[in-house]
């Protein structure tokens, strides 16, 4: 007990203590926190679907028909026709023979990496990969090798000096920097070394590529072996859950061996029904992606003119690098005082010296919201100079 209290106190003293906001509204551009209404730039609801009436209606209808919970894991009696239909539609969406639903993206990554490696394997990971990919590799008995961010020369050397690897795993859009992984260069490396290439497209699926088919489609890479696509359904899709897409033997292997698939309760079928409605909107409403991109472009152009330090990415994840944790926290507080919610991201989530504001945009934002954010950022930099 006393040890925990001391550890928490140390964390607080270092300015690293984390606390949750309590939302009293649906997710959206304007959120209610206590008695404040805040303009939010920090959700992953990239297309503004989390509170779309059609998605909510499908959720309700699904609950009416199939109840509140699945009642069992997929392999016992929890696999419902709603799950099956969603898997078929997701496979069709990404152009893959099969797709398999997982309860979260975190669990999907753990399941894929553990099912495909053993103590003789080596798992290669980009240093900036999401925690779930890092944890997935830790959970295996495989050797784990992390290459410097997007450094294909280093990865080539590491692969050349290694026994046969099992998996090369990478975020497609990196969650803290918003940049795209060099997937066109990773693919031939994976092929040459007979490794799987696990592409975590949590931030690209629904957002990038023709029809929102994701980062692979954006780069014209087919979703077929050795590529494994992991997409999440709680971000651009606005619902919850995740899927893995690949060929028949891969998906059957996951059903047999992925412990995070086997030993957990299936998603509520109503969630699958809501996601089916969301998928239809993702596929058909191209204007959401166009609008999102024009907001991103508006922000990047003006922020660059203002001399803010961006990463060069053109995705809806736009970090403003400020340097010290104190600077990032102070900036976030100043924006909050003006009713704008933008989180400060500090080490160890990002490298020392690169503490930042992490701004995310949604198709539900208006150009005027972006302008209000830019004005507030301009005042910040005036205040600092
Ligand atoms: C959010 C995220 C995940 C986890 O997905 P959940 O469905 O929220 O568990 C995995 N990878 C990346 C890159 C993410 O951003």
Image (cartoon, rainbow, N blue to C red):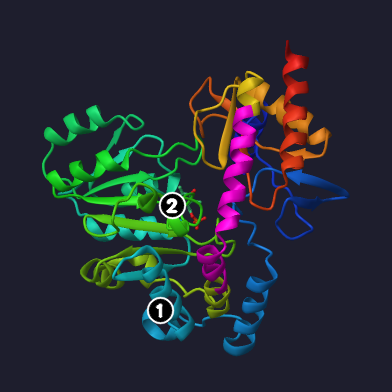
Q: Residue furthest right?
A: 35
- Give the quadrant of residue 181: top left
Q: Nearer the viewer, residue 377 or 253?
A: 377
Q: Which mark is residue 74?
A: 1
Mark count: 2
Per the image, label 2 sits on a secondary structure element best described as: loop
Q: What's the residue at 26%, 31% (across, down)?
A: 152
Is the distance from the Cβ of mark 2 to the nearest ligand 1 atom less than 8 Å?
Answer: no
Direction from residue 323 to residue 94 in the image, left or right: left
Q: CA distance from mark 1 to mark 2?
A: 31 Å
Q: Which mark is residue 209?
A: 2
Q: Nearer the viewer, residue 158 or 59?
A: 59
Q: Quadrant of the C terminus?
A: top right
Range of the magenta residues?
277-301
Q: What's the residue at 64%, 35% (across, down)?
A: 298
Q: Residue furthest bottom?
A: 65
């Amino acid at each position: 007990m006393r040890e925990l209290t001391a550890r928490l106190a140390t964390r607080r003293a270092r300015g690293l203590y984390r606390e949750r906001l309590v939302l009293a509204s649906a997710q959206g551009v304007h959120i209610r926190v206590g008695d404040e209404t805040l303009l939010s730039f920090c959700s992953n609801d990239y297309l503004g679907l989390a509170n779309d009436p059609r998605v909510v209606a499908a959720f309700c209808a699904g609950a009416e028909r199939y109840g509140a919970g699945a009642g069992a894991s997929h392999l016992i009696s929890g696999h419902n026709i709603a799950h099956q239909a969603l898997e078929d539609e997701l496979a069709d969406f990404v152009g893959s023979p099969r797709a398999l639903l997982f309860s979260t993206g975190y669990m999907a990554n753990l399941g894929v990496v553990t099912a495909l490696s053993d103590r003789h394997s080596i798992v290669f990971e980009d240093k900036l990969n999401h925690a779930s990919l890092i944890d997935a590799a830790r959970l295996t008995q495989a050797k784990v090798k992390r290459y410097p961010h997007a450094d294909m020369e280093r990865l080539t050397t590491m692969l050349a000096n290694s026994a046969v690897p099992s998996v090369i795993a990478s975020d497609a859009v990196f969650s803290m920097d918003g940049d795209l992984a060099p997937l066109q260069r990773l693919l031939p490396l994976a092929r040459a070394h007979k490794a799987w290439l696990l592409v975590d497209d949590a931030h690209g699926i629904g957002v990038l590529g023709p029809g929102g088919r994701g980062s692979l489609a954006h780069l014209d890479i087919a979703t077929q072996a050795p590529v494994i696509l992991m997409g999440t359904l709680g971000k651009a899709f606005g619902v919850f859950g995740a899927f893995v897409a690949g060929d028949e033997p891969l998906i059957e292997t996951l059903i047999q061996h992925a412990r995070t698939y086997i030993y957990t309760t299936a998603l509520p079928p109503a969630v699958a029904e809501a996601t089916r409605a969301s998928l239809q909107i993702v596929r058909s409403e191209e204007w959401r992606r166009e609008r999102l991109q024009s907001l991103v472009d508006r922000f990047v152009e003006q922020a660059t003119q203002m001399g803010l330090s961006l990463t060069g990415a053109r995705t809806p994840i736009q970090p403003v690098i400020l340097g010290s944790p104190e600077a990032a926290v102070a900036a976030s507080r100043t924006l909050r005082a003006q009713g704008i919610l933008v989180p400060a991201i500090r080490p160890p989530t990002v490298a020392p010296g690169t503490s930042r504001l992490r701004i995310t945009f949604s198709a539900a934002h208006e150009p005027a919201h972006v302008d209000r954010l830019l004005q507030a950022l301009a005042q910040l930099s005036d205040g600092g100079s």
